Amino acid sequence: MLSFTHIEGCRLRQKGYYMENFSFYSPTCFVFGKDSEEKAGSLVKRFGGSKVLIHYGGGSVVRSGLLDRVKKSLDDKGIPHVELGGVKPNPRDGLVYEGIDLCKKENVDFILAVGGGSVIDSSKAIAAGVLYDGDFWDFYRGQWIEDALPVGTVLTIAAAGSEGSPDSVITREDGMFKRGASGDAIRPKFSILNPALTQTLPPYQTAAGITDIMAHLYERYLTNTEEVEVTDRLIEALLLTMVHEGPRVIADPDNYDARANIMWAGTMAHTNAVGVGRSQDWLSHTIEHELSALYDCAHGAGLAVTMPAVFTYEMSHNVMRFAQVAVRVWGCQMDFAHPEVTAKAGIEAFRNFLISIGMPKNFEELGAKEEDIPKLVDVLCNGDGRKGTISGFITLNEEECTEIYKMMV
Amino acid sequence: MLSFTHIEGCRLRQKGYYMENFSFYSPTCFVFGKDSEEKAGSLVKRFGGSKVLIHYGGGSVVRSGLLDRVKKSLDDKGIPHVELGGVKPNPRDGLVYEGIDLCKKENVDFILAVGGGSVIDSSKAIAAGVLYDGDFWDFYRGQWIEDALPVGTVLTIAAAGSEGSPDSVITREDGMFKRGASGDAIRPKFSILNPALTQTLPPYQTAAGITDIMAHLYERYLTNTEEVEVTDRLIEALLLTMVHEGPRVIADPDNYDARANIMWAGTMAHTNAVGVGRSQDWLSHTIEHELSALYDCAHGAGLAVTMPAVFTYEMSHNVMRFAQVAVRVWGCQMDFAHPEVTAKAGIEAFRNFLISIGMPKNFEELGAKEEDIPKLVDVLCNGDGRKGTISGFITLNEEECTEIYKMMV
């Protein structure tokens, strides 16, 4: 049986106030545009850094010359720096421990992430860990991050939105599960966004980024808090931007403007500027995390397979919401006699869009295996302190999660 | 003759990059919802205030008990405070000088604005003036504000967006002209937004606020920078919110949700989150400022009369942009053979919307006089250092400004 707690809560509120109280605080300084990485040194200085750890991933930032340009910018301002590369997609706790040790040994007081969401998330984990006496993993078990070294970013992939968010996701090597941590203290002090840096990304990674951005929007759209028109409209605005720019950038990877619109939409999608005043979902993210942890697939690719299944499962709990996004974003005609037909058409249109930009449509294309479903469900529902269920727009137990994974096969 | 500089500039850029480099920095902490004014004391403390000037307008914040609740919140945290009331709509420089003297005498280190845009703008001017050796009016002649006392706000009217902006507009009593000043230093440290506080506003003031918010969106929409879909869509999202919520709140002033959506849309309209990556207009504001300065009318009411005239005058310079907002926001059918018909229909739809919520439609209803036009144009084009023209989406000389004012008669 599904839990109807959220829906009942919504019904009970019908005579009260719908729009929930909130705080919105996004103090990150975004510096956007061509050659903006040249400002790294002056930005580190402005935000108080005097000894920097440059944290990055594989060789691409080395080969492209980006790392050298960033180092030169620091050198020009007389700011000493050490380096730690090797962050992998779905970043691991092992490298975080290494980074914390390095920062303590070298008296680092500022962390500069040069890369995508994985590098930024790893940097945030290190930043929180350096100032914490216990095991940094405590934060990924649910402890709010109160204090951290300042973090700055030079973004190379439009996807995760970590450049403007208070969140970080890390994979625990012992057990291979992904968990998130949050705190205003890990919001980047500045983020440098140069769309030209994303022009060399392979189409698959570009498409996975687009999917991740759209997931951040959908997760904020699926709610049972009514009457927050402003947030609905802002999310739809960013989804419409992705619908317009996504195919343009896949057809023409050098299109700077398409890259620029996607990059800024990706940042805005995740500062929570478009998520205030109500509950949110995040079940697709929760369910996907076990896929990318186990198979090391791109998070966005996992989401492309996960979202249509989750949405189809959730749809009956708020048909009009799914119909609304179908009409306003996907241009579906409203079937006033059968709103569920419109709702379903919107999910199909989204799925077809994801397939059209090159994303996988099922377990097989993703590289996942049906026989792993029991293992996936067990880690999902019982791993690291969970007690048999996961919650978002609705609450799901093991049986229901099994059914959702099976829909993806 | 009109200047075509901007349009030619646009044409020249067709082979280059359209989306312009930008910085976006909005570090204000927004605390939104019912009873949020109770957090004033703890927020002043969090942002380092130890002696507060409470700045406000007329008696309504006294009569409603809001001022007492704010003082109690400061008292509860042991924060001493002094007061300066009397801010008028279209705030004057005289009270600013008084506030600066009071702050210096009382060693105030934090300014708390309790009111609407006028109170906040006056507070920002005082905050900048206290730390400046010269005449604070220098900032309103164009000098960037580099330093200021921290400002916090408790907002009572959804309109000006000053609670999240780096801007302030003050009227110089000697000559009665309005001028603006800017600087990140005067962005509020926090802004408390309780939609319930706006429920007692008379319909005319509510409608004037709605108009001001929509003006802030249109001014950012009218541009010759192409290819910034993300900014277009975000502005349209907020305009659509106003189109939905405006009539609801006029019909039912106690509707908390309509008030809440309008309040947050008003803040988002003016942090510049929806204005990045391109040029903006602001000619309607510039042309209106002389009206509210001379007749002391509500700024929003002045904009309701000004915008349709200015837009009709500007339309031919970028017909497709006016057609786009007509289709996407006002639901006009696109006339593909005659886009100018659609563009014009969008301006008419906007004008009818403003009239429907109770705004004036011409000079007479606003209380302005045709015979004052030469005086208005002279102050507009030549006052306080200007040299015969004003610039935005297009550049206008005295003759053209005369024509625009005449269209409003």
Image: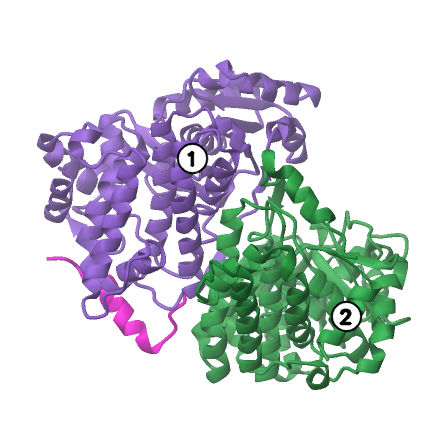
Chain colours: A green, B purple
Residue hosting label 2: A403
Q: Disc 1 vs disc 2: which is toward the camera?
A: 2
Badge 2: how crowded within 10 Å, few (<14), some, or many (20+)? Answer: some
What is the count of numbered marks?
2
Q: Tell me: residue A354, above or below residue A14.
A: below
- Residue A373 in percent (x, y) is at 82, 75
Q: Tell me: residue B213, above or below residue B192.
A: below
Q: Magenta region: which residues?
A: B1-21
- Residue A188 in percent (x, y) is at 65, 57
Q: Nearer the viewer, residue B191 or B149?
A: B191
Q: Quadrant of residue B43?
A: top right
- The answer to whether residue B147 shows anywhere in this view is no
As for residue B4 lying within the magenta part, the answer is yes
Which residue appears at 48% of the width and 29% of the height? Answer: B254
Q: Chain of mark 2?
A: A
As for residue B159 lying within the magenta part, the answer is no
Q: Chain of mark 1?
A: B
Mark 1 and mark 2: Cα distance apart in space: 45 Å
- Residue B4 in percent (x, y) is at 19, 63
Residue hosting label 1: B249
